[in-house]
Amino acid sequence: MIKVRKLNKYFHVPYTLHALKDISCDIQKGEVVVIIGPSGSGKSTFLRCLNRLEFPDSGEIIINGQDILKAKKEINQIRAEVGMVFQNFNLFPHMNVLENITMAQMVVRKRKKKEAEEKALFLLSKVGLKDKALAYPGQLSGGQQQRVAIARSLAMDPKVMLFDEPTSALDPEMIGEVLAVMKNLAREGMTMVVVTHEMGFAREVADRVIFMDEGKIIEQGIPEQIFTNPQEERLKLFLNQILSGK
Amino acid sequence: MQRLSMERPPGLGYNLFWKGVFLGIIFLFSYLVYFASQSVEYTWRWYRVPQYFYYTAKIDVTSPLEGEIRSITEDKDGIKVVIKGEEEETISLPAKSELLLSEGDYVYPGDKIGFYKKGKPGLFLVGLYITLEVSVLAIILGIIIGLLTGLARISKNPALRYLAITYIEIIRGSPLLVQIFLWYFVVGTLVNALLSKYGFSPIPSLWYGVISLAIFSGAYIAEIVRAGIQSVSKGQMEAARSLGLSYAQAMRKVILPQAFRRILPPLAGQFISLIKDSSLLGVIAIRELTKATREIVTTSLQPFEMWIVCALLYLVLTFTLSMFVQYLERKAIL
């Protein structure tokens, strides 16, 4: 479903940083991949390359048979197929919840208003926020905003969902509600790529865990193997730091 | 007015005292002006002001031909005077006219048949209207120019970007008065010469005034628009693009509506300066409020009152505008 070959990305501000070094990986349909790693390891950059919010310097990304780095105008259609959930939710503050979810449906998918609203209400009830349809993002808690953001992405009927640290900006008591929605999605067979620090989620839901450090994939495998029998020194160190911190 | 919460709330006496001081200063200042005008023996004649807002003009009706008045008929629509010379002509006057001649009188061309009175807007109102007209047109044009330039300013296309920067720098770096002269005496002369060469009528100076103001404020509005767009967090554009919206769609649906709310206050300030800057247009023979006031001063010989009224009229315009924008802001903020 997603095929990544030899991906390289440099940042030049304020000094040159080789953020992604020859990343290659394949993600199958229905697979849930969790990317972990220390901050600055390039995991978010990698995720953002997958819908071209970052344009890689070299390499190849094929999604559903389309080379997204060669796409011109079609990139908008491709992006509609790849849902993205951000750390800071990025809901549109000038629109209410319903408008947040229906706007792109009407603009990109050319759906009628009624159809888009039905879809929005269906998804809102799925994330448990049907009664908040007319609220504005500023009136919602972080957890509720993130669930709306997930519903907004799902409204485009994406084939893949990308999650960029979806719980990192949340108060601890709200992490659970967002993870629950994501678990449901995984159970329904959605292809998901998740960058997170929630090791519990990775262990429970992931089909595969990828450990990245310094712009490279250091180790990957099923959660069982990664968490109980890590091979690489750096992964062992990382897991020690994370687990002892808790 | 914001007060730091760490400060002790002031007592009743404190507020009363300082409000009194405020009023006292205002009163003292007004008295000083009055006192100074007395000592140069200026006679205030405020009663001269209203006639420059509205006055009743006496309009004479004269005969266009030589002949004899055959008949005068009066009904509720007005008065009809029939004059018979080489040919017959009917002259109509409004109902409440006064006739100076009667049937059988002989008239020559230009002879006064009668007169009537008609209310007319005075120079202040005329000037105010022109100022308003010029300002509204320039604001509308300026918004369009500013929005497009602001977008070009942040475009990734170098041609658009450099054009926008060049335009903004040139306009912001030269005095408005000079720009007005350039538009009227250079561009205006060229354009009107070309137009007359090909048989079109020339563009009136009002439009050169509107264009110079619009182009001038457009450069400032462009910078305001750019700052407004850049103040919307990057995540908003990313979220919109990640949903499949194109750059233009994301701008229109997500970025600009948010930017617009933020730029309302500085935009209002820009419009207020535009209204005030329109006072320069008198130099190219546009009879806006300032030019009208100068004419009024020349005829009335009461400069103190007239200039004070002129300033108050500008204040009414700018104050109304800023109230309107405050209302918009309150409506826009949730």
Image (cartoon, helix red, strand yellow):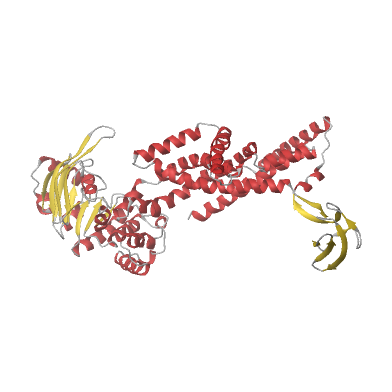
Percent across and percent down for residue A189 are 18, 63
Determine whether B203 is above or below A106 in the image. above
As drawn, the residue found furthest toward the front would be: B86
Determine whether B328 is above or below B272 in the image. below
Q: Nearer the viewer, residue A199 or B161?
A: B161
Determine whether B102 is above or below B213 in the image. below
Residue B9 shows in the view: no
| Quadrant of the rendering where the N terminus of chain A is positioned | bottom left
Residue name at image x 79 percent, y 48 percent: B51
Percent across and percent down for residue A112 are 35, 67
Residue B28 shows in the view: yes
Q: Nearer the viewer, residue B57 or B166?
A: B57
Q: Nearer the viewer, residue B99 or B107?
A: B107
Q: Quadrant of residue A148?
A: bottom left
Task: Give left or right: position of A109 versus B275.
Answer: left
Percent across and percent down for residue B195 are 54, 43
Percent across and percent down for residue B202 are 58, 44
Q: Quadrant of residue A11?
A: top left
